[in-house]
Amino acid sequence: MTQQFTDRRGRAVVLEEITDDNWRDVADVAPADGQRRFVAALAARYLLLSQRGGVWTSLGVRAGEAVVGHVMWAHDDEDGTHWIGGMVVDAAEQGTGVGRAALGAVVARLSALPECREIRLSCHPDNASAAALYASFGFRPTGDHEDDETVMALPAV
């Protein structure tokens, strides 16, 4: 049975593959102005990283009928960890529970992979709302850093 994730408006929040039908909507996702020091100004940057970098896999975040976000994931072949990155919720959708539901969905998706033992992400120390969200899921700092961000880890469930 597939776990359902919903926002505070009661909309189902799902992750979807990037397709010819949704990539433009995902590319246009933009965070609130105050978050642009933590994430890209448009999700288009993350789509390009996924397409051109060969490491990340982008997913659209849909709430009900609307594309409302982006998240990407990767597998680190060196240490076997799975990573979450490029999580952006459109400014108009922030505060509705979409971010929490999307994080729950991506954690569930990665945890279901047989080889997944640990999920990691990184968070800028000044991004208190993101750090609180990640901590509420059980992510804990590892002591490592990626650039100027704190690496956090969650054992796969």
Image (spheres, rainbow, N blue to C red):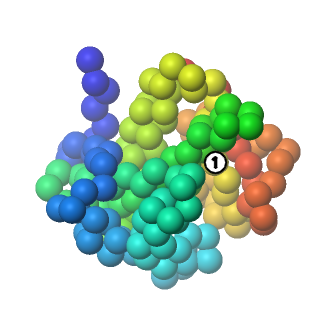
Q: Is residue 40 left or right of residue 42?
A: right
Q: Quadrant of residue 127?
A: bottom right
Q: Which residue corresponds to the image point at 36% horizontal and 60% vertical from the top-left?
A: 69
In the image, 97 versus 119, the foreground residue is 119
As helix, strand or loop, the secondary structure at mark 1 comes to: strand
Q: Which residue corresponds to the image point at 28% horizontal and 65% vertical from the top-left?
A: 23
Q: Quadrant of the N terminus?
A: top left
Give how far across and how far down residue 73 sits, in percent: 51, 47
In the image, 155 versus 58, the foreground residue is 58
In the image, 133 versus 145, the foreground residue is 145
Q: How many marks?
A: 1
Q: Is residue 152 left or right of residue 68?
A: right
| 53 w.r.t. 41: above or below | above
| 118 w.r.t. 124: above or below | above
Q: Which residue corresponds to the image point at 28% horizontal and 32% vertical from the top-left?
A: 4
Q: Residue furthest bottom?
A: 33
| 120 w.r.t. 95: above or below | above
Look at the image and tell me whether residue 139 can be seen: no
Look at the image and tell me whether residue 72 can be seen: yes
Give how far across and how far down residue 145 sits, in percent: 81, 54
Q: Hey, what amino acid is under mark 1? A: Leu
Q: Which residue corresponds to the image point at 39% horizontal and 38% vertical from the top-left?
A: 105
Give how far across and how far down residue 78 sits, in percent: 74, 37
Give how far across and how far down residue 155 sits, in percent: 64, 26
Q: Quadrant of the C terminus?
A: top right
Q: Is residue 19 left or right of residue 110?
A: left
For label 1, the residue is 121
Q: Label 1: few (<14), some or many (≥20) within 10 Å?
A: many
Q: Residue furthest left?
A: 65
Q: Quadrant of residue 30?
A: bottom left
